[in-house]
Image (cartoon, helix red, strand yellow):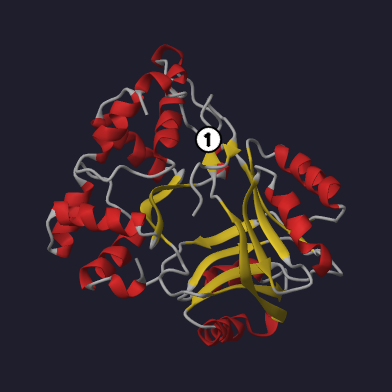
Amino acid sequence: MSVSTCPSRSALNRDEQHRDAQGLDAADRAIVLATQAGLPLVPDPWGAVGREVGMSGAEVLERMQAMQARGVVRRVAAVPNHYRLGYVANGMTVWDVDDAHVARLGREVAAIEGVSHCYRRPRHLPHWPYNLFAMLHGRSREEVERQAAVLCERLGEACRDHRILYSSRILKKTGLRLAGSRPGAAWTEPERRG
Amino acid sequence: MILDDLDGVDRRLINRLQDGLPLVTRPYAAVAEELGIAEGDLLYRLERLREGGLLSRFGPMYHAERLGGGLTLAALAVPEADFDRVSDAVNAFPEVAHNYRREHALNMWFVLATETPEAIDAAIAGIEAATGLRVFNMPKEEEFHVRLHLPV
């Protein structure tokens, strides 16, 4: 991408810099836009990003560190393709847990090996009684079921019921992308599908 | 490229980089040193793993809500005979980031990501109009853990 066509470029006016509710300014957002497809695989990735957005590599690095400290960036990491790495059984386990204990138990369940994501979500009675979600990944359904049994034991009597919903088909997977025209811009589809 | 193509160094690299790159001046050199390989070797291997599809992505993982966007998980109970039509209708919405078929009466589960938190409701209304089905909206109320780590 040439610098002149980079849509974030116009937003990057230091004289008009202001931070939004998340504490991001236009320069931070330019970095987000330049890196959401991935970090360049070159010895100095910060410098490469900096050349794209018109700042020094040192400033890119400093801003990435600040965004990570604020939790805007969870981490800079490899995202594995579950299936290709042999994790063919991906179970969304859902639990109907006593509301009085769900916050404490959610934290405990989240710490169990194999749980990648763990959230409390609303019930939709009578169709959907489950309020705690934990994603499990295994090389077989048996492995996922063994992990689920560990969770079940930890939840104990506070858990009234649970299910494992396996994914049987990926219907769409585009990931989250921030569109480029302005600060606070839109989420949209990437060019490449995974 | 398949799992069997990986050697021990590839595996250690995948495991190490799921934990995150250190945010330092020469980050790849720092990880290469940890693993006892050359920086160039690491970059070559990482590119091959990404291009070969064993890694979906390598880069910053952003927290959607902290970037100011809206994010939710939603589900539909789709009649079997109508599944493909509904799938196409749902996937046509750019706000739908992921969509999975799952084994349950609620058999379609998708993540909606929008420009603002307020835009989620409009996306849901649009999907209900397009499919004729009720959307079960399940936004997260509390996050306990987000850290995918799959050892190889």
B105 versus A34 height, above or below? below
Q: Is there any visible trace of residue B19 in the rendered image?
A: no
Image position of B8 (left or right of B142): left
The number of callouts visible is 1
The chain to which mark 1 is attached is A
Q: In terms of secondary structure, where does tag 1 sit?
A: loop
Residue A36 in the image, given as x and y percentages of width and height: 44, 41
Q: Is there any visible trace of residue B133 in the rendered image?
A: yes
Question: Which picture quadrant has residue A187?
Answer: top right
Question: Which picture quadrant has residue B36?
Answer: bottom left
A161 versus A190 height, above or below? below
Residue B70 in the image, given as x and y percentages of width and height: 64, 42
Image position of A105 (left or right of A55): right
Image position of A65 (left or right of B119): left
Depth check: give the residue in front, B144 or B131: B131
- The residue depicted at 49 percent of the width and 32 percent of the height is A23
* The N terminus of chain A sits in image quarter: top left
Residue A168 in the image, given as x and y percentages of width and height: 63, 72
- The residue depicted at 85 percent of the width and 46 percent of the height is B129
Residue B86 in the image, given as x and y percentages of width and height: 77, 56
Disc 1 crowd, CA 10 A, few/some/many (<14, 14-19, 20+)? some
- The residue depicted at 45 percent of the width and 34 percent of the height is A33
- The residue depicted at 78 percent of the width and 56 percent of the height is B85
A128 versus A49 height, above or below? below
Q: Mark 1 highlights which residue?
A: A22
Q: Residue furthest top?
A: A15
Image position of B141 (left or right of A173): right
Depth check: give the residue in front, B122 or A162: B122
Badge 1 amino acid = Gln
